[in-house]
Image (tube, rainbow, N blue to C red):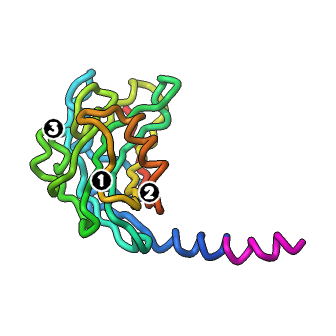
Amino acid sequence: MRLAAFLAPLAFACGAHAADFTVTSPQVAAGGTLGSAQVFDGFGCQGGNQSPALVWSGAPAGTRSFAVTVYDPDAPTGSGWWHWVVYDLPATTTRLPANAGTADGRGLPAPAAQGRTDYGSSGFGGACPPVGDRPHRYVFTVHALKVDRLEVPAGASAAMVGYFLGMNRLGQATLEARYGR
């Protein structure tokens, strides 16, 4: 009983703190549908293949860098599908413009780097679920990290970057949208 009484305020404090960290997009409504600009151009899909603008605020104290990931947990692969992995964003970053996720990374602030997506390359890869599947969920996550830089090799896989994100995360904010065809 005493332990529960001790832990309850801590859980409340952590929950309240996490609620302060948010991410939004002027192009993607939370719970909405991705537009054609965020659809992949290939694999039978025809879209703009552009990452949406993202804006975040309320990062936890001690944040020294950020990472952004986009993941489809509904992809029929047994392990989901990673659409974007960008890390080493400076702690002063609070937004990314639309189409910041080009393969060359020119829209990202230095020293940001991009990992390899499940399309086999770096940069944003848009939505492209199989025809006839129920609409897939696309989870845009901004990770607040306790380190200035992740120590991963250039072109690291999303799984490798994810491992280091988990080890260094102070908090995260998510925005989820859907897309089907």
Looking at the image, residue 75 lies above or below residue 7 = above
At x 16%, y 49%, the residue is 99
Q: Which residue is mark 2?
A: 174
In the image, 148 versus 124, the foreground residue is 148
Q: Which mark is residue 103?
A: 3
Q: Earlier in the sequence, mark 2 or mark 3?
A: 3
The furthest residue to the right: 1
Q: Which mark is residue 149?
A: 1
Q: Quadrant of residue 179?
A: top left
Is disc 2 surrounded by few (<14), some (14 to 19) or many (20+) residues within 10 Å? some
The furthest residue to the front: 151
Looking at the image, residue 180 lies above or below residue 69 = above
From which residue to which does the magenta span run? 1-10
**Is disc 3 placed on a helix, strand or loop?**
loop
Residue type pointed to by label 3: Ala
Is disc 1 surrounded by few (<14), some (14 to 19) or many (20+) residues within 10 Å? some
**Quadrant in which the N terminus appears:** bottom right
At x 41%, y 32%, the residue is 81
**Is disc 1 placed on a helix, strand or loop?**
loop
In the image, 33 versus 74, the foreground residue is 74
